[in-house]
């Protein structure tokens, strides 16, 4: 193991990962729970990718649903046309999402704060409108009834168990990549930009280039998550790209805890599991989500992950919201 | 000539009517942005609440006019309470927390309404029926009334912001709230009142437009993006700019639908917004350097 990698991957994280890998062995595990776990981990990973922008760089993107949706459509279009290899789908998603992300990031990172949020939002709305009305991609119905992708010729991803392990691998790799990234010099500069953009610029850093890189990396990881989605759902619809979905990603990050990586994963899992469990009994789930979000912004800006810190760390270290612990 | 009176003129008038109502919605949004630095995602829900509270009042009393009076008051009260309870504690934090908070508030209002009134589409009947002959065409009288009321309100607001002490204080707070605070003005109270006023305007727009459109919990989500566009185009924090931009967007949208399909219209308007954000982020009339 090289040194940055060793520094990034803690024993505790490995233990959690091992537990997740053993989860399907639990006696109460059914295909239903496996698919729920798939969704939870997938959106956890997406929220974690968004955290690179929100928590570390201080940029709030209201357009991440477009990256996710484009990834999903990339896979869907190939599967529909008979290309079954998951790797080709992922590669295609990287190209599509990457190109789109470069354009969005190029323009959006030239602006700060609310302008960045609005630019990402409007770009995403353009993509949404395009897919919503283009009949080649199924219009508002999207692309439905897709076959399962293949991991290798003959190894079809057609069981919940296989889906689960694919998503676990994705989460693990994305987590390692982001951990290495935020602990590197690059990550430190991102935090510097968040804390004081002008000062970072005066220190000689090409601030826009760093923001652009953070944006594209975050978008690519989100797009990869999107590309894995149709394998399980067998569809890609324009509703995946609605700006309110981007809002849900933001909620996951906030619930989990800004700038912690592991927090947003927790937030995503919490959001999905609660949604599944609560909405099967009552229909006021989103009312609860709204109230939770408001309360978290007001009283717990560090999110669920901050609770753990509140128990472990001294209160003084909790004084400033949104900070990354050294 | 036939084309002019049968197609072009009505569409232009639609645009004017819609633009005027959009102006009411965007004015509140731009004032709040100027004061708090927060794009209020819940503004669309205040608009929606105006229609629903109006629906309730009409259900109880049968009078649209009473609803037009009571709904904005009720929503203003809700706005004031919301501001004091949730936005005020966030003044000292980066504005992005406010942005995320209002997204949560929007969710609470929208889902709250769905719980109380259900998710069905509802209609409010126009209080004025019939149509009026105008320039060789006939046009629904209610829409003409809507246009007149909206324009009168915009005029009143202009007088309020230029001629009254309260209006001038609001504009001063947009310029420099800290200085105003130093001069002894109760700025937090000013913010609360401004938020209440902005909520009342949104509610008024919601109820006025309700007989033209339909009433449903998602109606605010559909309007808010358009209102954002108006605010950006007009220059964030610029009052006059918002009104001009509202008419531009309203008319552009209704005229473009004559020649383009809805997809292209939406993309054209989004494209315009992207262009403005990139090339001239302060919009038509915004001051230079506001959060750029």
Image (cartoon, rainbow, N blue to C red):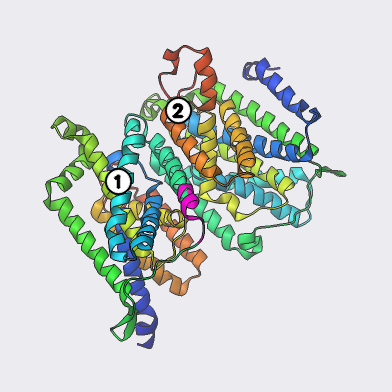
Identify which residue is drawn at 54% across, 51% down: A242
Residue B114 to residue B256: above or below: above
Spatial distance from mark 2 to mark 1, Cα to Cα?
A: 27 Å
**Subunit under mark 1:** B
Residue found at the very far top of the displayed protein: A314
Tell me where the magenta segment starts and ends, as one range: B111-120
Image label count: 2
Residue at 73% x, 53% y: name it: A78
Q: Nearest the camera: A189 or A81?
A: A81
> Dividing the picture into quarters, in which one does residue A294 lie?
top left
Q: Residues within 10 Å of mark 2 (few under 14, many from 20)?
A: many
Crowd class of label 1 (few under 14; some 14 to 19; many from 20; radius 10 Å):
some
Q: Are marks 2 and 1 on the same chain?
A: no
- Depicted A325 relative to depicted B48: above or below: above
Q: Position of residue B141 (x, y in %)?
A: 31, 76
Q: Nearer the viewer, residue B91 or B217?
A: B217
What secondary structure prevails in the magenta region?
Answer: helix
Residue A200 in the magenta stretch? The answer is no
For the residue pair B94 and B273, the one nearer the viewer reads as B94
Could you tell me residue A182's position as x and y percent? 55, 25
Residue B176, image quadrant: top left
Residue at 35% in and 87% down: B1
Label 1 sits on residue: B77
Q: Is residue B257 left or right of residue A181?
A: left
Chain letter behind tag 2: A
Give the residue number, with chain letter if any, for mark 2.
A301
Q: Is residue B77 left or right of residue A165?
A: left
């Amino acid at each position: 193991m090289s040194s940055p990698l060793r520094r990034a991957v803690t024993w505790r994280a490995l233990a959690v990962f091992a537990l997740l890998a053993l989860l399907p062995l639990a006696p109460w595990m059914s295909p239903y729970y496996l698919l729920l776990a798939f969704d939870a981990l997938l959106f956890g990973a997406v929220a974690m990718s968004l955290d690179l922008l929100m928590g570390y760089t201080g940029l709030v993107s209201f357009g991440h649903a477009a990256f996710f949706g484009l990834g999903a459509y990339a896979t869907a279009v190939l599967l529909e046309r008979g290309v079954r290899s998951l790797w080709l789908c992922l590669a295609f998603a990287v190209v599509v999402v990457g190109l789109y992300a470069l354009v969005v990031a190029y323009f959006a990172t030239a602006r700060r704060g609310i302008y960045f949020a609005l630019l990402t939002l409007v770009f995403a709305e353009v993509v949404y409108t395009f897919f919503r009305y283009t009949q080649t991609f199924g219009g508002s119905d999207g692309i439905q009834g897709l076959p399962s992708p293949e991991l290798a010729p003959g190894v079809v991803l057609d069981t919940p168990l296989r889906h689960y392990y694919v998503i676990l691998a994705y989460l693990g790799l994305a987590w390692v990549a982001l951990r290495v990234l935020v602990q590197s010099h690059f990550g430190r500069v991102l935090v510097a930009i968040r804390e004081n953009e002008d000062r970072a610029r005066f220190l000689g850093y090409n601030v826009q280039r760093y923001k652009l890189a953070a944006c594209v990396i975050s978008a690519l990881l989100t797009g990869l998550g999107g590309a894995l989605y149709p394998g399980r759902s067998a569809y890609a619809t324009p509703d995946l790209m609605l700006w309110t979905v981007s809002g849900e990603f933001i909620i996951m990050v906030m619930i989990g805890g800004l700038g912690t990586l592991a927090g947003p994963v927790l937030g995503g899992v919490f959001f999905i599991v609660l949604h599944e469990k609560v909405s099967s009994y009552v229909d006021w789930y989103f009312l609860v989500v709204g109230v939770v979000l408001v309360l978290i912004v007001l009283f717990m800006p560090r999110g669920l992950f901050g609770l753990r810190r509140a128990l472990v760390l001294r209160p003084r270290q909790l004084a400033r919201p949104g900070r990354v612990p050294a | 000539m036939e084309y002019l009176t049968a197609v072009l003129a009505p569409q232009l008038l639609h645009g004017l009517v819609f633009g005027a109502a959009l102006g009411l919605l965007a004015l509140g949004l731009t004032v709040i942005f100027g004061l708090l630095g927060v794009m209020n995602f819940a503004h669309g829900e205040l608009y929606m609440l105006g229609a629903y509270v109006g629906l309730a009042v009409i259900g109880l009393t049968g009078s649209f006019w009473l609803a037009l009076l009571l709904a904005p008051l009720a929503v203003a009260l809700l706005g004031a309470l919301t501001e004091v309870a949730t936005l005020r504690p966030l003044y000292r934090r980066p504005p992005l927390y406010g942005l995320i908070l209002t997204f949560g508030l929007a969710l609470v209002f929208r889902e709250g309404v769905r719980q109380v009134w259900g998710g069905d589409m509802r209609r409010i009947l126009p209080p004025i029926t019939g149509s009026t002959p105008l320039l060789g065409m006939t046009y629904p009288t209610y829409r003409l009334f809507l246009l007149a009321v909206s324009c009168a309100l915009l005029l009143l607001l202009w007088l309020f912001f230029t001629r009254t002490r309260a209006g001038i204080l609001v504009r001063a707070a947009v310029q420099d709230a800290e200085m105003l605070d130093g001069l002894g003005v109760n700025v937090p109270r000013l913010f609360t009142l401004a938020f209440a006023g902005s909520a009342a305007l949104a509610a008024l727009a919601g109820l006025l437009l309700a007989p033209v459109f339909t009433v449903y919990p998602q109606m605010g989500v559909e309007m808010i993006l358009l209102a954002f566009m108006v605010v950006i185009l007009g220059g964030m924090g610029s009052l006059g700019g918002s009104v001009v931009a509202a008419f531009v967007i309203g008319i552009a949208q209704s005229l473009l639908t004559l020649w383009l399909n809805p997809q292209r219209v939406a993309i054209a308007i989004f494209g315009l917004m992207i262009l403005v954000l990139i090339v001239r982020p302060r919009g038509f009339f915004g001051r230079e350097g506001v959060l750029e």
